[in-house]
Image: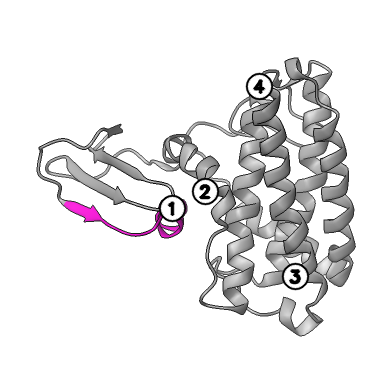
Amino acid sequence: MASNQTDLLIQTVMNEATPLGDLLAGLDESAWSRDSACEGWVIGDVVAHLAGGAATWANSINQAVAGDSDPPEGQEFMAPGQRGSEGTAEAARSSHQQFGMQLMENFRTGYAGLAQVLSGLKADDWDKPCFHRRGPMPIQDFVSLRLQELAVHGWDIRSGLDQTANVSEEALPVLTGRVSRWLNNAFVPGLRLPAPVRYRFDISSPVPVQEDVVVTRESFSIQPVSRAAANVTFRCNTGNYILLIYG
């Protein structure tokens, strides 16, 4: 991966983490108990999830650089089709209850440590396989996923405080590039569809997206926009498109 691309990716990750940390530092404990936009999670739960992720992901990257993409102690690969959302939510709530406002310091130190790990990566490190519970992926994809977590969950927090909040525009190019992988992970076959359904996305700005997602009972495909009639057409900005896709 070219150094200018990796430098931009690292900078974008930290441009998400640093302002979010500053925002959190200005909140009192009562604000952490407010509902976030992530259903069933209060703001403190989201902070706990992000803070814990920084440390564990830094460890996974260090492990990958050393040539090891196996699950770290206490973790394991998920089975195909297995859903991890309930376990993730339980872990976030437990961490919030255990650490409380200490999570603010955990967030800051965690992302400072992650930045140090990222800045130490060499050009040939970025393609090395890295552990992820859904299967090993190149470090560059793993870091992009960290950006996805920060951008979407950062919006969850900000939207809980301000309903006019938007997804960070700086992160949108990376997030739109991850849509196909996200849909692969999220799709559940066995839908009771009498015929294929064509969803058309006509997204003009700030990052254009023009494509069809065709869903059948057992699979889906992402296709260029065609002359075929769409069952549903979505027209919105890229931030709202990302929120729709990532649910």
Residue 70's x, y, as percent? 74, 22
Q: Secondary structure at mark 1?
A: loop
Q: For residue 206, which numbered disc appears in the image?
A: 1
Residue 163 disc label: none
Q: Tell me the mark number nearer the camera, choosing from 1 and 2.
A: 1
* Residue 206 in sight here: yes
State if disc 1 and disc 3 touch (CB < 8 Å). Answer: no
Badge 4 amino acid = Ala
Residue at image point 86% right, 29% down: 120
Query: Which residue in the structure is indicated by mark 4?
Result: 2
**Quarter that holds the N terminus:** top right
Q: For the residue marked with disc 2, what is the amino acid?
A: Leu
Residue in the foreground of this view, choosing between 5 and 112: 5
The first of marks 3 and 4 along the sequence is 4
**Residue 156 placement (x, y as % from top left):** 59, 65
Residue type, mark 3 in image: Leu
Query: Which residue matches tag 3?
Result: 23
Q: Closer to the N terminus: mark 3 or mark 1? A: 3
The residue segment tinted magenta is: 232-247
**What residue would you read off at disc 2?**
172
